[in-house]
Image: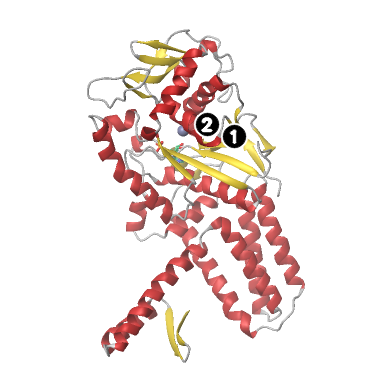
Amino acid sequence: MNTVRLYNTLSRRVEELVPVTPGKIGLYCCGPTVYDYAHIGNLRKYVCDDLLRRTLEHAGYEVRHVMNVTDIDDKIIKAAPGGIEAIRRHTAPFREAFFEDTAALNILRPHVVCAATEHIDAMAALVAKLVESGHAYESEGSYYFRIAAYPEYGRLARLDTAGMMAGARVDVDEYEKGDVRDFALWKAARPGEPAWETPLGPGRPGWHIECSAMSMQYLGEEFDIHTGGVDNMFPHHENEIAQSCATGAGFVRVWLHHEHLLVEGRKMAKSLGNFFTLRDLLSRGHDPRGIRYLYLSHHNRSQLNFTFDGLAAAERTVHGLVQFMDRLEDALPSLEPGTTALAGRVAAARQGFFDALYDDLQTPQALARLHDMVRDVNASLADGSARAGDVEGAREALEDFDSILGVLAHERASLEEDVERLIAERQEARARRDFARSDAIRDELLARGIVLEDTPAGVRWRRV
Ligand code: AMP
Ligand code: ZN
């Protein structure tokens, strides 16, 4: 097990991760609100979560990754007025689209994906518990969290709650720090809005209660890491901490907040109209691996200013890495056995890459080690000094890096599938003596830089 250090928003410091259960990590990541397609700002957040999960797994932890899907909140009701069926019809395709997008970005699927509307009873039970402990009260069928009953309120976002008006309430899910009030846990049924029958009476949950109820349901009352974008810190996560006080347990050990993606200096947001979806970029011919790499080349706590030049540079880098991997494989058969001093430098680069990740996910430093290694190996291949053991070590290091980066194997897997399918189709064409079709397939592959060789052992392919 390697030691991992992470920046904890609670303490505003980088701290050594000390899990509740040795060797295991409970990780809860705030998920999408499925009222529309995710934009590439939202998707940055999920790549950052993926980076965190893969880094923890690489460090030797067994991670249980839980993510919610918000399929009921103010935004959704606005987009799909009506009852439960109306929001279900509206959200289902966006939920599916979200997982298509995350798959295209090679984001590992969480072990548990939990939808708010499937956990209404757990939320209602948590609200009832808060009423019982004196932290919540009812007013006209809605339930509110009584901030005055929780003196620690404001610890995460570092709020000054001294001058707050006791008893003033806020009903909307999203509001600013200046509006710190008793917030809605449960909203009484209103005409034209979905409502569920529960012991609290008919109504629907506020946004914040879902993440408290579901995280504790799947990870226990105290767990290791909870993530979100920086905008989730207040009020969402502040309120989650407050709501969890009903249990008396510690709730979350590390709060981790990813910075935003910006466009021309402003947060990319639907409300500002300055957004792109992944679909927009793919339809313009961009490469999802380049987008993933672009995200990873910035530290998760730095803002990332999105530009098309930046994306093009990231795409070139990924293509360069794919070619480098091919170059290593092509070189190997003709190299002398053994190793040189290069092998030691490759091992040091590999160590340096992971040391940087284990130390607060410092991807820019990790990538610098990777590119140093690429230059070093290329130079040794060019001057003829590299031996097979050196190159084998570099190949293994690159595969190891890619267990985090996820830009090489992903391409290989999808490319291989594609090429194998075309080869099989070409074999069928030849069997039925349709040489026009078999030649057309050969030409199509050639145009994509793939050469076929007919050998006694069957058809083989390589990249040119
Ligand atoms: P939503 O689907 O609106 O609930 O947002 C999903 C996630 O995306 C949240 O964790 C937000 O913090 C995050 N997010 C929203 N806008 C941006 C942005 N411009 N850059 C990075 N993350 C964002
Ligand atoms: Zn959440």
SS type, badge 2: helix
Looking at the picture, how far across and down is residue 117, in whole percent?
36, 33
Give me the residue at 36% from left, 43% from top: 275
SS type, badge 1: strand
Q: Quadrant of ligand 1?
A: top left
Q: Nearer the viewer, residue 426 or 415?
A: 426
Label 2 sits on residue? 216
Amino acid under disc 1: Phe
Q: Is residue 417 above or below residue 273?
A: below
Q: Nearer the viewer, residue 442 or 385?
A: 442
Looking at the picture, how far across and down is residue 156, in whole percent?
57, 25
Q: Is residue 87 above or below residue 54?
A: above
Q: Nearer the viewer, residue 97 or 26?
A: 26
Structural crowding at the residue carrying mark 2, measured as other residues with C-alpha within 10 Å and reported as few (<14), some (14–19) or many (≥20) = some
Does residue 146 appear in the picture of this structure? no
Give me the residue at 55% from left, 18% from top: 153
Does residue 111 appear in the picture of this structure? yes
Give me the residue at 35% from left, 29% from top: 73
**Mark 1 residue CB less than 8 A from any atom of ligand 2:** no
Q: Residue furthest front?
A: 199
User: CA–CA distance between discs 1 and 2?
Assistant: 8 Å
| First of labels 1, 2 by sequence position | 2
Residue contact at pointers 1 and 2, CB within 8 angstroms: yes
Q: Which mark is residue 223?
A: 1
Structural crowding at the residue carrying mark 1, measured as other residues with C-alpha within 10 Å and reported as few (<14), some (14–19) or many (≥20) = many
Please say which color scheme the image uses: secondary structure
Looking at the picture, how far across and down is residue 259, in whole percent?
52, 39
Looking at the picture, how far across and down is residue 285, in whole percent?
35, 61
Q: Nearer the viewer, residue 313 or 9?
A: 9
